[in-house]
Image (tube, coloured by chain):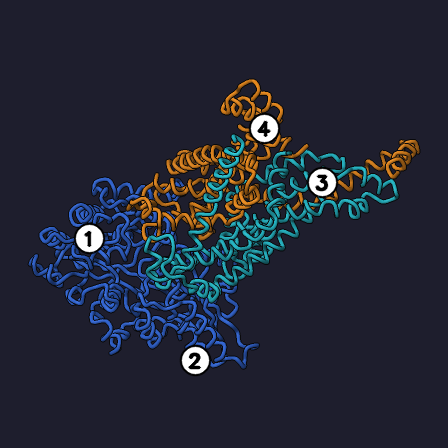
């Protein structure tokens, strides 16, 4: 009954006049902005202004502890960074961490998503437990893994009959760092993939089965193509996140043994050394590299972000 | 026959997942109960279970004040962020206005922002505004970086809410604002809960802002405080005390996960990929 | 992280005591002491490096002596010197008025003074603070003609050796003209090690600067020129220092030298292969505790002897390193006058004696070493006093953290040091880093 009333009134309403509609539209316009404005203001306060300031500071040679020694140097700081071996070394380290982490996570994440999708017994338990690494504090996870691999307190050496000082070598330290990262963030990727799996039409699967496709063929020909969007979105988010890696490195190695990431290098110049000029140039470059990664995904791989926005 | 076998296989897969997620947690829990020479005996479990480390951390003002800061800051940031995000998400899901796409793109861009690139200038800004090393100084950046997540999650939820009811309310003479408050808010409550948890997780987890924008007990949150622990003597590592503190701050996470498992999964997936 | 930056002279004995408990006790006692005048008594906040409660005890003592004029509250900084500096710099850059007094590693005094973070002492205020202070620490207190910090305690390194090993090798390390080469030869002849700190951290810089200074050189020519200072490692003295580092690393060092910090050196020295070691005086008390705990043989302990750090050239006196803590007054403190009084109390002779006995950190005033209790606890008291008195500070530059990190970066790992190229590379890197032409 309510439905008919509504429909009736709506028709009447529409008939009352178009003139009021533009008023309404304008009101909606205003209300829309009023509702969005506070959120936009807070988001910009902490990003746009500091970013602008970083750009400005990056044109100076300036130490916080030597205000008098401040001098304008134009774009020299960028030249210094881009010709510095240390910068390229940290970029390399960061890219290695990002690529390896995301690749492993995609594989494990897919396996986890399949399990969560198909499992009957203990479904709730599995979905609950997978949220633990997601929710746990990154610093806590880093400590847990660090202590597990530590020479003095760790059980890993004991279990595998090793006597290795994991954090004393670049690649073994990176191995542990990557492991901790993978552990912590695979749940995120697997949940996104789980959502993607739910979108794969079941009848397509059945049809493929009837056609005699093997499990692997069904996976590569039906499942993956149908969730390409979900995969790309998951990859984009995780890539950007992995590229910003900081907490785990800070806790585990403090950047020793060439395990420094771009974020860590930036932090050290701006906060530890208080070399605000050079550090700001690094901040800007860090920001630009994140933009570049996003651009590659969006344009190069045609990742469809409208799905992210839910439009 | 076959389906039974696959059921068992998938269940085994599930078991593997549980083992994967729980092992490091068990390890840090077990480490937190170790004491003395046990800490360095390289065994997984303590030979004697001791509560000493918990006593130590609760006796340390470094930790207790950090815990207070973390709880307070995270809760306030969560409430503030979710309120703003609710308003914004409502507008995005329900209203037509110019610049909507711009708002969404901005939110997305901010979610991708490298936070470390901001802490330098932010530090400068905060000290001239006088909010360096205060709760507010952390609440604001937490809000900025959780708003995008909250806005997506909430607008995805809001889209699921039946249009007609709001329309009906408006037809019955309610203004858009009333329609929002009386009709949408109750329907949106589950979505708001989900967004709140995700925001809380972010604030609770933060480390970069925590170490760069604080300096004392006044505002330093737990993740940052952990890096400040000292051993009983200079060359001793505070391994066990850190573990105990780590376990304590993991408890709220586990509790939330246990209670809101469905909501969190729904929030993560619906916010990111329309499912 | 902790490994990356162990402070030079920082150290507390291994007594198993709960720091938090001690702090709480001390603070509690402080509260009781002036409970009545709570409201009107100004509180001075003293930012301290972590110790076993010695500074908290002094805060309590001086609060009592102030008799209601002020109350000192301690606030603890992170464990390693670099993080301590980072915290203080950030607070002070934010013009924080809550920092009344700070415990500052002596190497950071120039940087803080140059940035305007330290309230200078007037001549009148300074007089009692620097009276009878040994020459080494005295040098750390001044910046651009003003006294900006008060010596609280000082530190230096000694040559520690095993009597039996020295006898076997036929040298007397306590003789005046013993050189690094003699020590290395003795270690090689006896199949023992020369333990030093060679990890990539400040402790390695301590060793490098001592060698350069002992060879008659300086890391920086004009340290007070700030970012325009000229490094001078590529000099006869710098190259000589590099030669010794190379020799130690290749002929007589522990295989783990490139990750060795103070405690690794001590462990190596106490082991069967131990022969010689350059380290801070804390090792003596630490060895004693090890004996008490049963992890070290009394015989090994009795075998330990000490001498001044070796020379580089037989006819030039060695230059022992200098470490320690000065107290500074925050430039933005609301109670600078009271803070001066408090600093005077915390650094007076009695307090320094107390602190040395409680924490094992050597006093900065000469008379500390005349105290009978100190002489009993530290049989080598005179040697420590003499070493501190003639110690040479690390470069007194407002850019010291960068200079140290740049030097260590080029000199690490010790095995790779080449007298022909390493000092020159370090010079180049220091200039580039100071001029913002290279990342660090």
Rendered image: mark on residue C215: 1
The reply, left or right, for residue C415 in relation to residue B199 is left
Quick check: B171 above or below C50?
Answer: above
Rendered image: mark on residue B158: 3
Q: Pick the residue in front: A246 or B36.
A: B36
Q: Pick the residue in front: B204 or B5.
A: B5
Q: Position of residue B19 (x, y in %)?
A: 46, 44
Q: Which residue is mark 2?
A: C65
Query: Is disc 4 in contact with disc 3, using a CB cutoff of under 8 Å?
Result: no
How far is the residue under mark 4 from the one under mark 3?
Answer: 22 Å
Nearest-to-viewer mark from 1 and 4: 4
Q: Which residue is mark 4?
A: A229
SS at mark 1?
loop
Query: Is disc 3 in contact with disc 1, using a CB cutoff of under 8 Å?
Result: no
Q: Position of residue B49 (x, y in %)?
A: 40, 61
How far is the residue under mark 1 from the one under mark 2?
Answer: 47 Å
Residue A263 appears in the picture as rendered:
no
Q: To which quarter of the image does residue C160 belong?
A: bottom left
How far is the residue under mark 1 from the one under mark 4?
Answer: 68 Å
Tell me the subunit letter for badge 1. C
The lab-note entry on whether marks 1 and 2 share a chain reads yes
Q: Position of residue C436 (x, y in %)?
A: 41, 42
The chain whose colour is blue is: C
């Amino acid at each position: 009954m309510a439905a008919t009333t509504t429909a009736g009134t709506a028709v009447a309403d529409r008939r009352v006049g178009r003139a009021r509609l533009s008023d309404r539209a304008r009101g909606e316009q205003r209300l829309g902005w009023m509702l969005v404005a506070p959120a936009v203001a807070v988001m910009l306060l902490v990003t746009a202004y500091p970013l602008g300031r970083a750009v400005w500071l990056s044109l100076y040679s300036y130490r916080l502890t030597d205000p008098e020694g401040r001098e304008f140097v134009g774009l020299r700081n960028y030249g210094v960074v881009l010709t510095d071996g240390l910068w390229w070394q940290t970029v390399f380290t960061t890219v290695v961490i990002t690529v390896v982490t995301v690749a492993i996570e995609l594989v494990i994440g897919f396996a986890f998503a399949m399990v969560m999708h198909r499992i009957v017994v203990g479904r709730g338990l599995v979905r609950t437990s997978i949220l633990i690494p997601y929710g746990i504090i990154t610093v806590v996870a880093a400590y847990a893994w660090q202590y597990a691999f530590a020479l003095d307190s760790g059980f890993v050496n004991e279990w595998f009959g090793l006597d290795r000082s994991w954090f004393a070598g670049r690649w073994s330290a990176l191995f542990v760092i990557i492991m901790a990262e993978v552990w912590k963030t695979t749940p995120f990727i697997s949940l996104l993939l789980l959502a993607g799996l739910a979108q794969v039409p079941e009848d397509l699967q059945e049809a493929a089965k009837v056609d005699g496709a093997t499990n692997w063929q069904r996976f590569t020909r039906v499942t993956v193509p149908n969730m390409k969007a979900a995969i790309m979105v998951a990859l984009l988010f995780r890539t950007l996140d992995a590229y910003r890696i900081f907490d785990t490195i800070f806790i585990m190695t403090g950047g020793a043994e060439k395990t420094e990431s771009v974020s860590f290098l930036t932090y050290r110049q701006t906060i530890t050394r208080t070399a605000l000029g050079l550090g700001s140039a690094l901040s800007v470059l860090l920001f630009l590299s994140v933009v570049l990664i996003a651009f590659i995904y969006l344009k190069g791989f045609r990742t469809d972000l409208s799905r992210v926005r839910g439009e | 026959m076959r389906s039974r076998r696959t059921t068992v296989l998938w269940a085994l897969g599930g078991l593997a997942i549980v083992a994967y997620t729980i092992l490091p947690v068990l390890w840090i829990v077990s480490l937190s109960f170790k004491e003395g020479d046990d800490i360095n005996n390289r065994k997984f479990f303590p030979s004697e279970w001791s509560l000493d480390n918990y006593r130590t951390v609760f006796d340390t003002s470094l930790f207790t004040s950090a815990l207070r800061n973390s709880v307070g800051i995270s809760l306030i940031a969560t409430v503030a962020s979710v309120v703003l995000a609710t308003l914004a998400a409502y507008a995005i899901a329900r209203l037509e206005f110019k610049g909507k796409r711009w708002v969404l793109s901005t939110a997305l861009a901010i979610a991708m922002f490298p936070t470390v690139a901001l802490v330098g200038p932010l530090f400068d800004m905060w000290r001239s505004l006088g909010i360096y090393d205060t709760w507010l100084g952390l609440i604001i950046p937490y809000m900025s970086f959780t708003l995008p997540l909250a806005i997506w999650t909430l607008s995805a939820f809001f889209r699921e809410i039946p249009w007609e009811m709001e329309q009906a309310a408006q037809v019955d003479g309610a203004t858009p604002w009333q329609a929002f408050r009386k009709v949408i808010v109750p329907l949106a409550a589950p979505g708001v809960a989900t967004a709140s948890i995700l925001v809380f997780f972010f604030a609770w987890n933060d480390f970069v802002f925590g170490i760069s924008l604080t300096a004392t007990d006044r505002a330093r949150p737990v993740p940052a405080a952990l890096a400040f622990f000292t051993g009983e003597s200079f060359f001793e590592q505070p391994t066990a005390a850190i573990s105990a503190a780590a376990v304590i701050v993991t408890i709220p996470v586990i509790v939330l996960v246990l209670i809101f498992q469905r909501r969190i999964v729904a929030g993560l997936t619906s916010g990111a990929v329309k499912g | 992280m902790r490994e990356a930056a162990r402070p030079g002279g920082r150290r507390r004995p291994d007594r198993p005591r709960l720091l938090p408990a001690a702090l709480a006790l001390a603070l509690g006692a402080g509260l009781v002491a002036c409970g009545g005048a709570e409201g009107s008594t100004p509180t001075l906040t003293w930012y301290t490096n972590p110790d076993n409660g010695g500074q908290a005890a002094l805060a309590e003592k001086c609060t009592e002596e102030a008799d209601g004029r002020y109350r000192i509250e301690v606030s603890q900084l992170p464990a390693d010197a670099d993080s301590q500096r980072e915290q203080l710099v950030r607070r002070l850059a934010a013009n924080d008025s809550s920092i009344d007094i700070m415990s500052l590693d002596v190497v950071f005094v120039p940087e803080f003074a140059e940035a305007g973070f330290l309230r200078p002492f007037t001549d009148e205020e300074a007089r009692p603070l620097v009276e009878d202070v040994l020459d080494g620490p005295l040098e750390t207190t001044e910046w651009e003609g003003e006294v900006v910090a008060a010596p609280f305690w000082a530190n230096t390194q000694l040559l520690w050796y095993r009597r039996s090993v020295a006898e076997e090798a036929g040298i007397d390390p306590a003789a005046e003209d013993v050189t690094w080469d003699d020590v290395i030869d003795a270690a090689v002849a006896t199949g023992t090690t020369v333990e030093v700190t060679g990890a990539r951290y400040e402790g390695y810089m301590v060793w490098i600067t001592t060698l350069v200074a002992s060879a008659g050189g300086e890391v920086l020519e004009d340290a007070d020129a700030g970012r325009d200072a000229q490094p001078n490692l590529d000099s006869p003295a710098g190259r000589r220092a590099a030669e010794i580092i190379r020799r130690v690393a290749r002929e007589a060092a522990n295989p783990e030298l490139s990750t060795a910090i103070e405690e690794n050196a001590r462990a190596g020295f106490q082991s069967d292969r131990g022969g010689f070691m350059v380290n801070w005086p804390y090792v003596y008390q630490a060895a004693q505790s090890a004996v008490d705990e049963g992890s070290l043989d009394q015989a090994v302990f009795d075998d330990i002897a000490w001498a001044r750090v070796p020379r580089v050239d037989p006819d030039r006196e060695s230059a022992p390193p200098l470490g320690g803590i000065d107290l500074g007054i925050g430039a933005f403190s609301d109670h600078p006058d009271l803070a001066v009084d408090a600093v005077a109390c915390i650094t007076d002779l009695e307090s320094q004696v107390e602190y040395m006995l409680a924490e094992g950190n050597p006093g900065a005033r000469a008379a500390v070493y005349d105290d009978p209790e100190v002489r009993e606890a530290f049989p080598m008291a005179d040697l420590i006093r003499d070493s501190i008195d003639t110690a040479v500070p690390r470069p007194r530059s407002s850019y010291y953290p960068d200079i140290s990190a740049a030097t260590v970066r080029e000199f690490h790992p010790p095995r790779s040091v080449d007298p022909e190229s390493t000092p020159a590379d370090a010079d180049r890197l220091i200039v580039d880093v100071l001029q913002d032409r290279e990342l660090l």
